[in-house]
Image (tube, rainbow, N blue to C red):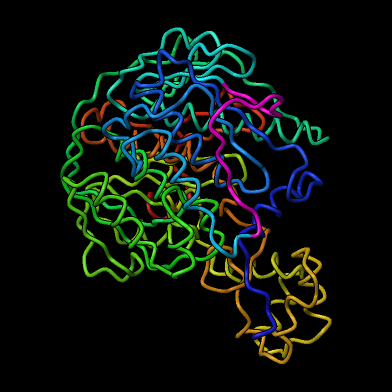
Amino acid sequence: MAAIRPETEIDRTQAALARHGLKLPLARGSVEIAVAREVAETEVAQRIVYVLVNELARMKGVVSAIHLAGVGEEPTLPGIPLRAAGFASGLSQLVESLNGPGSPLRSELVLGSCPDPHARVRVGEASGGGLRIAADSWRALTGGWSDEADWHAAAPYGSALAAGLAAAEIFKTLLSVNSVETPARKLEDLAYSLFNYGTGTEATIGPAVTALELTSTALAGCGAGGTAALDVLVMQPGLTGTIELIEPGSHKLSNINRYPFVTASDIHEGRHKLASAIGHLAVFAPALAVTVHARPWEQLAAHPFGLVVSAVDTIEARWAIQARAAPDATIIDAAVLGLLYSVLRVAPGGWCLDCKHPYDPELALKQRAARWGEPLEIIRAWTIEERTVDAAMIGALAATQNRPVEDFAGLVGLPFSEAPRLTECGTTSMQTTVPSQAPVLPLATVPLGALLAAEITKHHLFPEAALNNWLAHDLLRSPARPRIARRAARPDCPRHS
């Protein structure tokens, strides 16, 4: 097994670009964020800039440098999760913390304008070109809708969503300037509310939120989506109460590109994911009492929670959450695929997790078949016969994974049942690009985190506004039109029938 190449920081990012025929680093990757001086010392602008810089800095090799114009050493406002008193210093410290001694590509923040950026956004009414973005408590506002901004809004949900939308537009712009055609429409004027999920004139402004107390809340899965939700929640003023975090895994190299408060030292010191979460919450949400469980959901002794946010990465884990949740629990299930994010709120009479993923006793075999590039019947036979992995088998595997055969040489001679299952977010040192819900870039997980944080807040304060019961939003193809539906329960679902 020693011959199997471990996953690196850039494997998954390179996989994302390979789908568009590109390689790291991009030849054109400079980005300018221009902030209007009159809003640089406001809560909404600082949230937008923090989230956007954090997200872009983790896209190493896609973004070569982030140029930040119009921002200096304004005081870092309360609720902005930076560790320096000056805003620019805090951002610089954040970006540099992503660069370890072994990082093949580095993140760079330049204070000041860029003479010829390849992509540009404007926060507020900054002069020049580029997408104009703003927000209020619940709405992301772009283009002409930015005129309706509330720069001192208390709640952070619109700000985080605005930054996430802007990052997706920057990514699409960089694909375009690096000679790739995309089917994307350019995002211009948009108002998008996380209070009622309406757009344009139907986007509800929503109520002010000056305090939030969490009760009976559990987050199952502290990966990219779960930690994105926590990062948005810590920006909510008056955050108190209790939350329980369930996560069995430790960090690996690719997490630096996808987890919003992971640093290079977290990665290279092999810290547990919960250690990063505890450290972040202790500093930026000190009034929130946190209980952690370093084990899978199904291994907890009890599951008494009234609200369960499911941010796990396998179908089997989703089944386990639904099977062992309290009968009256609210379950919010999150998933991403590429630039698409999706949320399902399990509601009476609507789709549940068994409806979304009907039980399949051969699911694991089918997943292995897809990842090894072989028919299901062959994978079943290899498993039953304890077939010894040979050169021909890893040749097909390497072709499917689009990786050199040498990367899998350590598998030769192993019984097939002992070969790693190649799940992208599993504990194996190998990685795969097909098929998986695991994000390779933070582009979908940032809007997802904003949505999850908004749903947690609505569950506690405005339950009548909760999602009912399914939403999907493809940032690549339809940035202005999230799809929302109440999906009826499947007639053959054992939970309903």
Give the side of residue 421 with respect to residue 219, left or right. right
In this view, the residue in front, 340 or 290, is 290
Q: Residue at x 34, y 21 (%)?
A: 42
Give the side of residue 128 with respect to residue 332, left or right. right
Q: Is residue 120 above or below residue 299?
A: above
Give the side of residue 316 with respect to residue 496, left or right. right
Q: Residue at x 66, y 42 (%)?
A: 64
Q: Position of residue 394 (x, y in %)?
A: 78, 78
Magenta region includes residue 111: yes
Q: Is residue 155 above or below residue 247?
A: above
> Main structural element of the magenta stretch: helix, strand or loop?
loop
Q: Is residue 157 above or below residue 363?
A: above
Residue 477, quarter of picture = top right
Read off the magenta span: 104-121
Q: Position of residue 320 (x, y in %)?
A: 38, 63
Q: Position of residue 317 (x, y in %)?
A: 43, 62
In this view, the residue in front, 440 or 477, is 440
How many marks overall?
0
Q: Position of residue 307 (x, y in %)?
A: 26, 46
In this view, the residue in front, 221 or 374, is 221
Magenta region includes residue 389: no
Q: Residue at x 47, y 41 (%)?
A: 92
Which of the image's four quarters has the N terminus?
A: bottom right
Residue 332, quarter of picture = top left
Q: Residue at x 33, y 47 (%)?
A: 331
